[in-house]
């Protein structure tokens, strides 16, 4: 397997098509044991993403391009980015400074976690305004949304699309994250609908209340954060660390959310693997647990009425 820049440059000279580079990237990733899961679920998916994004092609399907021959400059660029993925162990999304949820592009860099929340998938799966008993029957009636722990602003931006009448507040404790969110809000032309707010959880909102709160908080236990693979080490620790057992911030959210929800409103929150502990700690709360294609019971929905 190639080792270092000269070897990767030599490889670039021997490969000619997109298919060649896909195979080469996959072999190289597997040999280097790189870890996936930052917006892609396998070495193959991440290789395809990295190649398509570097070639400025749509990232949804590599198949139409597999037999395309590459220009010299493209081959050099691909060999270089595959090498950097392995040498730096930086997730592909950071290398190309882009991530997608449901085809929606977001700028990302090391100031924010790479967007991959299950909430993104759920929000497009009909829970808001879908036909099969949605949590919110009429999205057009939602006037206010809070995206707590907004990071790159990805969920706030999705919410702006799903709730056309809503004004959206998006809050985070990290000024760095808010700077990235600002890039994304401007990129999507939503500066007039999304207000970025800095502070600890609900503190910057003062007395404000909302029809809907969405939140993907930090929820990883300290010991798990300690054991993270190098890829996760490129992400801000505060985006993951949820205290000793991972649920310190989730508990604070549960304790305060009702004060910031309008009658009939609800909280949609991702909590990782903390379901059993939350059910034990809050026996009086009637959590509705939601599944996605890749997760089981890692997201709950609670109405304001259930919370109080
Ligand atoms: C898991 S990330 C989620 C980011 C984004 N919503 C997403 O889904 O990609 C958690 C975010 O919470 C922020 N955060 C951590 N502690 C916080 C706190 N006490 N108050 C507000 N935000 C906090 C972090 O800066 C980080 O951006």
Image (spheres, helix red, strand yellow):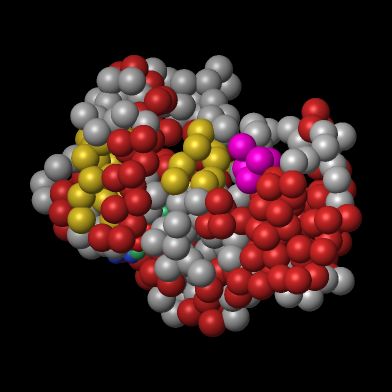
* Magenta-tinted stretch: 52-56
Position of residue 303 measured from the top left corner of the image (x, y, whole percent): 36, 39
Q: Residue at x 77, y 65 (%)?
A: 8
Residue 206 or residue 51, whichever sits in front: 51
Task: State left or right for residue 148 relative to residue 99.
Answer: left
> Of residues 102 and 83, which is closer to you in this image?
83
Q: Please name whichever residue, 209 or 108, is drawn nearer the observer in this view of the structure.
A: 108
Q: Quadrant of the N terminus?
A: bottom right
Residue drawn at the location 49% of the way across and 25% of the way down: 134
Is 272 left or right of 208, judged from the image as shown?
right
Percent of width and height locating residue 258? 25, 47
Q: Residue furthest left?
A: 207
Magenta residue check for 196: no
Residue 115 in the image, given as x and y percentages of width and height: 50, 50
Rendering quarter of residue 82 = bottom right
Which secondary structure type mostly characterizes the magenta part of the structure?
Answer: helix
Image quadrant, ligand 1 = bottom left
- Residue 98 in view in this figure: yes
């Amino acid at each position: 397997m190639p080792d270092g820049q000269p070897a990767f440059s030599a490889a670039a000279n021997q490969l000619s098509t997109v298919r060649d580079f896909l195979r080469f990237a996959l072999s190289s990733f597997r040999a280097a044991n790189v870890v996936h899961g930052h917006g892609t679920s396998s070495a193959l998916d991440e290789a395809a993403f990295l190649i398509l994004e570097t070639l400025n092609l749509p990232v949804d399907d590599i198949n139409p391009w597999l037999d395309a021959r590459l220009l010299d400059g493209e081959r050099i660029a691909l060999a270089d980015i595959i090498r950097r993925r392995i040498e730096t162990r930086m997730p592909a999304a950071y290398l190309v400074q882009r991530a997608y949820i449901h085809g929606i592009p977001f700028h990302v860099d090391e100031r924010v976690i790479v967007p991959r929340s299950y909430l993104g998938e759920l929000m497009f799966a009909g829970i808001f305004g879908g036909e099969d008993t949605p949590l919110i029957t009429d999205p057009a009636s939602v006037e206010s949304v809070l995206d707590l722990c907004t990071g790159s602003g990805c969920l706030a931006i999705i919410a702006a699309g799903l709730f056309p009448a809503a004004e959206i507040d998006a809050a985070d404790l990290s000024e760095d994250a808010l700077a990235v969110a600002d890039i994304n809000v401007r990129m999507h032309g939503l500066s007039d609908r999304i207000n970025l707010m800095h502070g600890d959880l609900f503190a910057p909102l003062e007395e404000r209340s909302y029809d809907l709160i969405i939140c993907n908080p930090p929820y990883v236990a300290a010991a798990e954060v300690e054991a993270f693979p190098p890829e996760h080490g490129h992400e801000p620790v505060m985006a993951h660390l949820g205290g000793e057992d991972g649920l310190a911030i989730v508990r604070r959210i549960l304790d305060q959310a009702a004060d910031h929800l309008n009658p009939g409103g609800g909280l949609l929150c991702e909590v990782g693997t903390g379901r059993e502990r939350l059910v034990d700690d809050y026996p009086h709360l009637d959590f509705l647990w939601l599944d996605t294609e890749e997760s089981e019971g890692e997201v709950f929905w609670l109405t304001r009425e259930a919370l109080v």
